[in-house]
Image: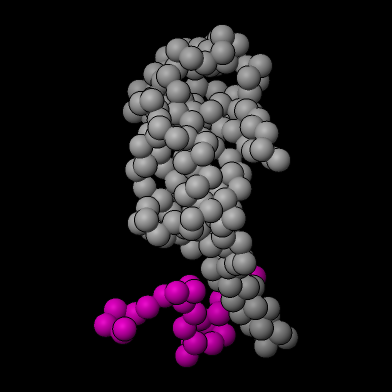
Amino acid sequence: MRAIWCWLALTAVAGLVLTRGSVQADEETIPLDKLPKSVAAAVKKRFPKAEWIAAAKETDGKKTEYEVILKNEGQKIDVTLTPEGMILQMEKEISAKDLPKAVTKTLKKSYPKAVFKRVEEFITVKDGKETLEFYEVLLGIEKKTVEVKVDSGGKIISPLGKEGDKKDESKETGRQRTDLSHSKRAGLSTANCYPHLSLQPAGYRSRGIV
């Protein structure tokens, strides 16, 4: 029986490590002149007068996308495209005063003490048609920040919390700790079962080893 529990604990932890490694996309910054011609041409056509700031390539399994950061008429724009030059989505920075009245009203009612730190339009593109999906607003509340997504009608999409909610970057780490503690709840750990075995996350390198 002990052998079976040990095997189950080892399988659970190994599966978690493999899963965590596989879902992380590989993103790298690339020189602007190294962008595929189709990508560069599409961006130039859509934003002919924009200033080009930076570019990145993201690979997730067999899927590859390019992101080009621009500055157009003083506003920052992130454009995501396929390698063939098809624009998939855009994130356009705008001024808080340019938000629809319904959006501003909702935000001021839900977060009366908040300060607008960043406002962006999130736009998807399908068959050449651009659709405004929502506004992404970063609010500052004293020493905290909260990121809110609101549709053009003023309905909050996320988060569902109230003022004072904080964007917690440690949640993911907390989930990992919770998942990795399952074997301990059973009264066993892989270390107890296999003291000679060392499990490390994908991509891990020990110090001093190249």
On screen, residue 130 above or below 127: above
Q: Position of residue 199 (x, y in %)?
A: 49, 79
Q: Position of residue 66 (x, y in %)?
A: 50, 53
Q: Is 191 a magenta residue?
A: yes
Q: Which image quadrant is residue 63 in?
A: bottom right
Q: Position of residue 133 (x, y in %)?
A: 64, 30
Q: Position of residue 172 (x, y in %)?
A: 51, 52
* Residue toward you, 117 or 72: 72
* Residue toward you, 21 or 118: 118
Secondary structure mostly seen in the magenta stretch: loop
Asked whether residue 163 appears in the rendered view, the answer is: yes
Q: Is residue 164 left or right of residue 182?
A: left
Asked whether residue 174 appears in the rendered view, the answer is: no
Q: Which residue occupies 50% across, 22% down?
A: 163
On screen, residue 204 above or below 44: below
**What colour scheme was applied to this rendering of the protein?**
one colour
Q: Which image quadrant is residue 19 in?
A: bottom right
* Residue toward you, 59 or 143: 59
Looking at the rendering, in which quadrant would you find the N terminus?
bottom right
Which contiguous range is marked in magenta? 183-210
